[in-house]
Image: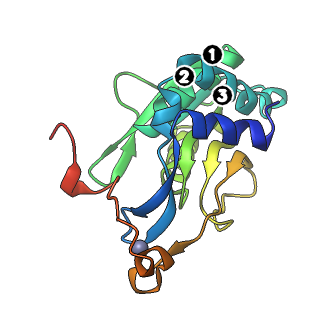
Amino acid sequence: MLTREQLLAIFCKTKALQRGHFELSSGLHSGHYFQCAQFLQHPRLAARVCRDLAQRFRGKRPTVVIGPAVGGIVVAYEVARALDVRALYAERVDAEIQLRRGFSVGPKDRALIVEDVITTGESARKVGELAEALGAKVLGVGVIVDRSGGTVRFARRWKYERLFTLDFGNFTPHRCPLCKERVPLAHPGSVRRKAGG
Ligand SMILES: [Zn+2]
């Protein structure tokens, strides 16, 4: 198992975790920005970290791993590889989460829901509810990074596991200490900078 320090080193080295002065998509300001895709673009590291996540659920004998698109796709794939089971992803269609592309789960499935980063937990919760509605048993939710500040809650019948907790403070702009120090503000998640249309 990787320690918290080892995970932090991986996130910093791959620039998944950056320090500076950032405007988050919520409009809040932060001295840290986390972009999980920066770390997941390195398959060997992604496999190493996802193996630890898989290990937390191995004893529950999942038969399928499901992640919400887009962030959960790579995580589901690597966790499923470690467990030698199927990897699916669920997609948002309008307000609903669906399994498309011929993907299916049923009463014989024991589903593990995974996600790269969790903030409110809404996507993972909807994927779990979808799997249950299709008859599968949902074993739990596993995430690489929890940045909910300890607020995320799932059904008690679901085991919840996170590898890393991000608990850096966020600030409203008028209370932001970095604004007071006139540190230049970056907009990493801003729609104004949306790439690729
Ligand atoms: Zn600020």
Q: Nearer the viewer, mark 3 or mark 2?
A: 3
Q: Amino acid at mark 3?
A: Cys
Quadrant placement of the C terminus: top left
In the picture, measured across the screen, residue 95 lies left or right of residue 43, that is left
- Find residue 101 and report its image quarter: top left
Q: From what the image shows, is residue 124 above or below residue 166? A: above
Q: Residue at x 39, y 46 (%)?
A: 97
Q: Is mark 1 within 8 Å of ligand 1?
A: no
Contact, CB < 8 Å: mark 3 with mark 1?
yes
Return the residue at label 2. 77
Q: Position of residue 118 (x, y in %)?
A: 56, 52
Return the residue at label 1. 81
Distance between mark 1 and mark 2 Cα atoms: 6 Å
Q: Amino acid at mark 1?
A: Arg
Mark 3, secondary structure of its residue? helix
Q: Is mark 2 within 8 Å of ligand 1?
A: no
- Find residue 190 and report its image quarter: bottom left
Mark 2, secondary structure of its residue? helix
174, 60: nearer the viewer? 174
Q: Position of residue 122 (x, y in %)?
A: 50, 57
57, 150: nearer the viewer? 150
Mark 1, secondary structure of its residue? helix
